[in-house]
Amino acid sequence: MKVFVILPILKHEAYEEITLKELSRVASKDMEIHVESLEKGPASIESAYDEALAVPGILELVRKAETQGFDAVIIDCMGDPGLEAAREIASIPVVGPCQASMAIASTIASRFSVVTILKNVVPLFHDLTLKYGVAEKIASVRTIEVPVLDLEKRWNEVKEALAREGREAVEKDGAEAIILGCTGMIGMAEELRDILKVPVVDPAPAALLVAEALVRLKLSQSRIKYPTPPEKVRKL
Amino acid sequence: MKVFVILPILKHEAYEEITLKELSRVASKDMEIHVESLEKGPASIESAYDEALAVPGILELVRKAETQGFDAVIIDCMGDPGLEAAREIASIPVVGPCQASMAIASTIASRFSVVTILKNVVPLFHDLTLKYGVAEKIASVRTIEVPVLDLEKRWNEVKEALAREGREAVEKDGAEAIILGCTGMIGMAEELRDILKVPVVDPAPAALLVAEALVRLKLSQSRIKYPTPPEKVRKL
Amino acid sequence: MKVFVILPILKHEAYEEITLKELSRVASKDMEIHVESLEKGPASIESAYDEALAVPGILELVRKAETQGFDAVIIDCMGDPGLEAAREIASIPVVGPCQASMAIASTIASRFSVVTILKNVVPLFHDLTLKYGVAEKIASVRTIEVPVLDLEKRWNEVKEALAREGREAVEKDGAEAIILGCTGMIGMAEELRDILKVPVVDPAPAALLVAEALVRLKLSQSRIKYPTPPEKVRKL
Amino acid sequence: MKVFVILPILKHEAYEEITLKELSRVASKDMEIHVESLEKGPASIESAYDEALAVPGILELVRKAETQGFDAVIIDCMGDPGLEAAREIASIPVVGPCQASMAIASTIASRFSVVTILKNVVPLFHDLTLKYGVAEKIASVRTIEVPVLDLEKRWNEVKEALAREGREAVEKDGAEAIILGCTGMIGMAEELRDILKVPVVDPAPAALLVAEALVRLKLSQSRIKYPTPPEKVRKL
Amino acid sequence: MKVFVILPILKHEAYEEITLKELSRVASKDMEIHVESLEKGPASIESAYDEALAVPGILELVRKAETQGFDAVIIDCMGDPGLEAAREIASIPVVGPCQASMAIASTIASRFSVVTILKNVVPLFHDLTLKYGVAEKIASVRTIEVPVLDLEKRWNEVKEALAREGREAVEKDGAEAIILGCTGMIGMAEELRDILKVPVVDPAPAALLVAEALVRLKLSQSRIKYPTPPEKVRKL
Amino acid sequence: MKVFVILPILKHEAYEEITLKELSRVASKDMEIHVESLEKGPASIESAYDEALAVPGILELVRKAETQGFDAVIIDCMGDPGLEAAREIASIPVVGPCQASMAIASTIASRFSVVTILKNVVPLFHDLTLKYGVAEKIASVRTIEVPVLDLEKRWNEVKEALAREGREAVEKDGAEAIILGCTGMIGMAEELRDILKVPVVDPAPAALLVAEALVRLKLSQSRIKYPTPPEKVRKL
């Protein structure tokens, strides 16, 4: 099974490496993982504006993945940018970490909190969870106020902040589980779980497992929900 | 008051003209309306994919409108493409016809149906109405199965189909009012209202009136909901 | 365009004047505004009981407005008293400030708080927002604990309290915008907006703009939602 | 225990009698039932307008009931007109047949249909069920298109229509139980239950039993939800 | 009228006695109440696991009640264990205190809190209120952290804790009424009501009154919602 | 990885075999699957009563699975009987096919229908989907009216009925995907998918993949949602 992981930001070696490393840890043996970033787009995704600029590049990579015979695509950002458009133009399953991690979380808890990067992206989660029909399950969306591109540099501070906000989510907001709210936090779930004593879902690995499940179950996005776009002039 | 109307498709004289004409009919005397289409993008919007391709051009025009001193912007497509990103980067109000027409409809009816072009776009309305928190008010989304670019050519057929589907919406689905589900249907509301005896909301004129209301009330999109995107490298 | 504004309380010169003045500030040039109070009813509206007593007088004025050729009616109280009955007996649009201000607010924010007068009226908002299908958008209903008839006398205290509760709504309750919860607070929105840095909706002006939008769009309340009452004996 | 039943319409001997007779059938032995109609108001209630005109008279009778030492009041109309105002001014429990019958129905079924008189009142149920938080439990609201004042004259036709619409509600709409949608249908539930083989709730008797339950449990409406109206000038 | 009250725990004299005594206080004169405990099952119910172990014994007693000519059954535990299965195999009404007390509470308040025993059972209420369609009405579920079997021993501590948590529910969570969250708290409602000045619903008495209402109204659970189980081999 | 599959019915060779065979088809190479039926319980599960009788045996097998070192448990029935109790007493993940298949379906469609065996079980799905917070995603629950124990005997009839009801679900109810509503239908999804051209989710294989995902992600049910039951006397 070959999975194409789109890192929908300008090339960033460190994120490509850690993403590949962490995804490989949970992948089944026969899985081949390819991680690729954008040539044009934003350096990180922290607004609807960033998402909008990333989408054209994402859609190109989705086409490439299908052409090259991949079995599934992951758009590796917690905002699931371009997910609907990508699903319309692909026949292989396209998976978004936000939707996937919430599906996984809903099988082990009935209410969960997202702990994410910046206040700026809280409204994006509000809209996404409404669109996905899981808004009732969200206990809270909390932030650590560290921008994406600082996450790796400020690893220890990030861990502490995640633990602090995660604990508040559990104790004050009624969260029964935590979802890491940025795929840039990849690899932090296990440690956090040990501290908080509740399930902590790492969205990119969750997306990988959902992608694998869909492929093995021979399922892909519904063509009724994501119909093939009609032919027409499109000037790029 | 100056309102900038973005027609988020490749230049199409007929649509530009009829849009300007119909909007001018409902505008107050001191309003100046400018209609402008995209240089790059899709010929029409009938999928999430089309929307994704239109957004970069929309965002450019939003910046242009603000720079040139317009008081408000309308993204003249019923899918409200790029609305969130546009609001993040603008300080003047940016209005989407879908959101605006549903706000207007909700002041005269508690349940309404959308009659739109193609089955393909029904899922887009599903997601939009969830995101806007009005899904409970939607009695149904019905289609006439005419592509956007055929609307003006097949005007009579379109009218008949709107009347037929509108009537079904009222009689079978419990609609108390109808919203035209494509800004390409502009100008058809009044005739349909006379036939169906229920309010029929024309989305682009509704958007214009909402834009005017916001400007006169000195209101614009909330910065908490639509925060200014952080500075960063963005390669276009 | 002529709009009839019903002040659904016993005659109160100061409120009539300020209402006319503030509405005139946002009205378009060709709009004629008539403000009229009740001959029988409560001195102010702070309970369902007050509303019930105001309704017969409101309905009389609605009939008068239509007979005298007005284009629209506003029932100028945040509880929208008698709105359904008024719409049943009128063919011109009848607008309620609560419903109208929430429709306007929903075009610029997804969650908003109401800051109103007394704890007593909080349950009325609870019921109204459920009835209007906007309960999910309400971040909170906060009160300043000043009775309607004291608002003008205690203007400075009121302003401070509005600022304090508005800030709490934004910081603690997740409000992205504020709606003034009493039409007696008319004229305070702009100053509050400057303090809070979020949109503040003044309900009576919002109602006026919605009324104007409906008239210009040639729309009125749906006869399916608000059918004409059957003929029968009614002893008054 | 003494229960005051307000028939919120102009005096109508037949309805007073049948109401008393049918309520007495389900009442416990020690219950004393008093039925009283309005001196001013509508001949029947089939619109929000009728409700508005009935409310002042209802409130007078509510005061009378409390003054005369009754233990509970029932506002005997399926629209529960004036319920909130009545509860504000009374300390004894005031019960509405719509709310009470839906509470009873929800203990034996999860989805039920209302079969009522005229299309005109369907929107009133829509609003009431939203306000009461039971809208999700309503499978449908169906009508027999017989005005209230014709119910007793056209008894056989009414029965047939109730059976027909009740059956459709069960077979097509997913109703697990039926609520008679007008207190003027009192006494028809048992026969209908035998025909349809599903529970059929008669709203006035249900209201009586809820009133009795509240009195015996020493419960009344919450003062937080229904606060005592503040003192002020009220000109009647 | 004869009502069979199943105490779904291992025999516990004190609870049997106080239950009988308190139920008798609110029962009508002609009611005969029989209280019976389980021979096999848990000593108390504080988890889904306890509920699961209690159900087989409950179902046996339900059959016994119907065979012996009782008019109604109450499963006297706030978790309503086995309610669905019991209703499938009985034709007489089977009533659960959780569902019944919430139905009663919803006729006097629109939002209420449950004050119960242990944090462990909070998720059970979450699921129950979703299943019953009343989740929106729940202001909060608070706990006093006293296990069921300690309730009577620590009566004074329990009262104080109920008052404290009840007050918080009213002041902080927006509760308009309180429901005692364990049938083992029977008899404490009245005192608490006097302290808190809001309605306090005692679930077992509420269930008794609902059972009586159903019997007098000749209603029982809907066979569509609770169909008779098909015949088949069942090895016990 | 070792997964214990509980077939919560009396031993039935054919179902054990086909379940093992079909699950093995989608399992990863290193997975060991053990299928075991009940010694006491119902021959099939078609009511809440059947579920109640199956639960004690299920709980015994859950303990056995954990003791014997399995990594996860599947309760292989579409009603997820005993899921909450099982999760309370286990530390390894316990997965229910209903919850798991709906989680999987929600990643590829926003609305789906369940096609199941008998009308009798429709209310069980109603309650389950409310409890799981996915009721809004259910387009319909349709039935083929074939009892569980006849499924294999009437394979061709079953296939035709599934195709017919699946098609109606898509064309009339708005389903974008289908979930097989009984784990006894295992193995039929692929053929049905080819006929209907929409995703068809087979619940037991979906449960297996979710179980595998949880194990690989080192996740298990939240202890806050499913706390360990307190120690106490429990007489079995």
Image (cartoon, coloured by chain):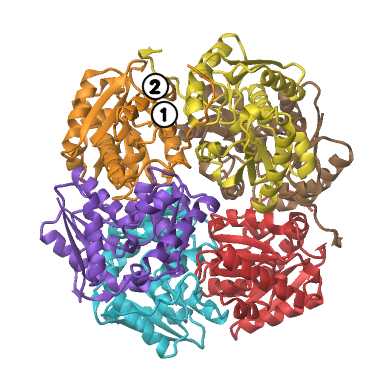
Chain colours: A yellow, B orange, C purple, D cyan, E red, F brown
Position of residue B31 measured from the top left corner of the image (x, y, whole percent): 20, 36
Res. C231 in view: no
Quadrant of the image occupied by residue A72: top right
Examine the rendered structure and indicate whether residue D9 appears above or below residue B131. Answer: below
Q: How many marks?
A: 2
Q: Disc 1, disc 2: CB below 8 Å?
A: yes
Q: What residue is drawn where x is 51% and y is 87%?
A: D29
Q: Name the quadrant of the N terminus of chain A.
A: top right
Q: Secondary structure at mark 2?
A: helix
Between the C-alphas of marks 1 and 2, the distance is 8 Å
Q: What residue is drawn where x is 30% and y is 23%?
A: B148
Residue extending farthest left: C68
Q: Residues within 10 Å of mark 2 (few under 14, many from 20)?
A: many
Q: Which mark is residue B82?
A: 1
Q: Which mark is residue B54?
A: 2
Kind of residue indicated by mark 2: Ala
Parent chain of label 2: B
Kind of residue indicated by mark 1: Gly
Left or right of residue A217: residue A21: right
Position of residue B226 measured from the top left corner of the image (x, y, whole percent): 46, 38
Q: Name the quadrant of the C terminus of chain A.
A: top left
Residue extending farthest bottom: D68
Parent chain of label 1: B
Q: Secondary structure at mark 1?
A: loop
Badges 1 and 2, same chain: yes
Q: Earlier in the sequence, mark 1 or mark 2?
A: 2
Position of residue F116 measured from the top left corner of the image (x, y, whole percent): 58, 39
Left or right of residue B149: residue C125: right
